[in-house]
Structure formats: C-alpha cells, structure tokens
Amino acid sequence: MEVMTNSTGSLKISRDVIATIAGCAATEIEGVAALAPFTSGLTTGWVLKARSSLPVAVTLNDDVACIDINLNLEYGAKIPEVSAKVQSAVKDAVQNMTGVAVTKVNVHVAGVVIADAAAEA
C-alpha cells in the first residue's frame, strides 16, 4: 500500500487501485482485446513457472511502482506498437491519477483473439 504524508494527514493508495487504473488504461488502447486472467509458461529445464493469476500485478518499492500486465491482443494488431502504446498509457494514467512514480510497465502478451471465431461461437 502506497502512503503519502503531508501536513494535513496521510493518503493510502492500495495496489488494487493502481492495478484497476492500469487495467482500464490498457484496455482503452486500440488492438487490445482484453486483460488476460493468467498466463503460465515453461522455463528452462522444462519446469512449469506459475505467474500471477491476476491480469495486473503491481510491485511497490520506495514510492515507485513496477507494473506487470497480461493482455490478449486482437488478431492483426502490431504487437510492438500496441505494447508501446499500452506502456505509455498505463504509466501516464497511474502517475497522473495517483502521483505514484512508475518505473516499468511490463507487457505480457498472453494470447491473440480472432474476432470471426468469437462471433461465430
């Protein structure tokens, strides 16, 4: 929890609030289909690595946030361009709305959503 203190009192900002702001900012970017509920991958040595089950993870260290966000992108979206836009939008939104400095926004592309297949189902 982020705590900011001034002469009139203190303000506590939950990691969940920062995660919600980050998620909303990311889904507004063209090419992002949705937040991905979780991802898992294989690491070297074929050991299964479990990642967070939440789509957005926030780490706070010394009044600075590092944000990891899992996304599903729309088919045809240019991954590097969409990722850069997401990083910029998330960083700006969190810093402007909370005053918490953001050092990194790590984007994890968990999948691609094909609109035609989703419409038929």
Image: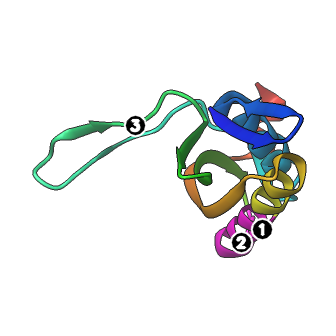
- How much space separates mark 3 and mark 2, taking CA atoms? 22 Å
Q: Which residue is mark 1?
A: 88
**Residue 83 percent coordinates (x, y):** 68, 66
Q: Give the quarter of the figure containing the C terminus.
A: top right
Q: Residue at x 76, y 40 (%)?
A: 5
Q: Residue at x 46, y 33 (%)?
A: 52
Amino acid at pointer 2: Ala
120 or 29, which lies in front? 29
Tell me which secondary structure the magenta stretch mostly adopts. helix
Q: Residue furthest front?
A: 7
Q: Secondary structure at mark 3?
A: loop
- How much space separates mark 1 and mark 2, taking CA atoms? 6 Å
Q: Residue furthest left?
A: 45
Q: Which mark is residue 51?
A: 3
Looking at the image, is mark 3 or mark 2 earlier in the sequence? 3
Is 26 rendered above or below residue 2?
below
Judge whether residue 3 is colored magenta.
no
Label 1–label 2 contact, CB within 8 A: yes
Is 67 rendered above or below residue 78?
above
Amino acid at pointer 1: Ser
**Residue 106 percent coordinates (x, y):** 56, 59
Q: Dot 1, crowdedness within 10 Å: few (<14), some or many (≥20)? A: some
Q: Which residue is mark 2?
A: 84
Q: Which residues are magenta?
A: 76-88
Tell me: 78 left or right of 92: left
Q: Which mark is residue 48?
A: none
Q: Secondary structure at mark 2?
A: helix
